[in-house]
Image (cartoon, grey):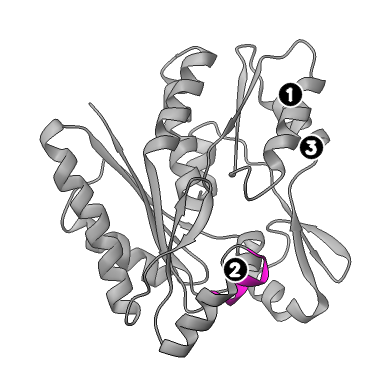
Amino acid sequence: MPEPLAAGNGVVVVPMWVTIGGQQYRDGELGISEVLARFAEGVSTSGPSPGELAEAVAGADQGDGVVVLTISRRMSGVYESARMAAASLEGYRVAVVDTGTAAGAQGLVVLAAAQAARSGLELEEVVAAANGAAKSTKLLATLPSLEHLARGGRVPGAAVWGARWLGLNPLFEFRAGRIAPLRPSRGTKAAYQRMVSAVVGEVGRADARGGALHLAALHALAPEAASSLLGRVEERVEPASSFVGSFGPVMVAHTGPGLVGLAWRWEPP
């Protein structure tokens, strides 16, 4: 989520960590290009500690409770760290929500919770809004290669080998808290068209019932491609909200450069 968008919605972002050659850096301290250039030194990532999360909660609390929304627990230990942080804070009302997703899709869930909080809803109602958004949010993305994801054990090695051998463009979705490879596309152009069609097709099915589309284009060192992809959707449908979000070094360490994707959710009336 872009920093101005987070700050404007009262969202506090707790950075993750990237370790290169045994040295830890907060996400954002190093540029993405530097992280990729130093990959041979050994790169790993980790989430914020319970202490860091507890400090963030205490700083954000205004007396009416705090909701912590984490990346999918199947992808990271941040959810458990957040639960430990919440348990350690006496006198605070803290709810921890597993968004079941990541990246721009997680951003859409966070924004739904922020909107509920800013409208004056109680803590439990904000949690319900977040859970509802998490169930309806989808993410599709394409990569030049699945090798970085396979290296981290997030997709089967056979999927990488097959895509490389056939010269196809990998396509994947976030489903049930995990990355799931889809049928690859014959080239980047075809992959982009499938993503646009998926969003527009869902809008077409839901539009008769009314509601609003919330949309995010995400990328790893490919801002022009992400903006173009967002524009192609906006030519067909008008979203109630949209943004372009760049991956930070932690995410790029897992995906590699060149990722472009769309995340969206259809908000019922």
Q: Which mark is residue 268?
A: none
Using the image, determine if residue 194 lies above or below residue 190.
above
Element type at mark 1: helix
Using the image, determine if residue 69 lies above or below residue 101.
above
Name which of mark 3 and mark 1 comes first in the sequence. 3
Element type at mark 3: helix
Residue at the far front in the pictured view: 158
Amino acid type of disc 2?
Leu
Foreground mark, 1 or 2, reads 2
Amino acid type of disc 1?
Ala
**Residue 222 screen position, x and y as percent:** 46, 72
Q: Which residue is mark 2?
A: 149
Q: Which mark is residue 86?
A: 1
Alpha-carbon neighbours of circle 3 within 10 Å: few (<14), some, or many (≥20)?
some
* Magenta residues, start to end: 146-153
Residue at the far right in the pictured view: 22
Viewer-nearest residue: 150 or 203: 150
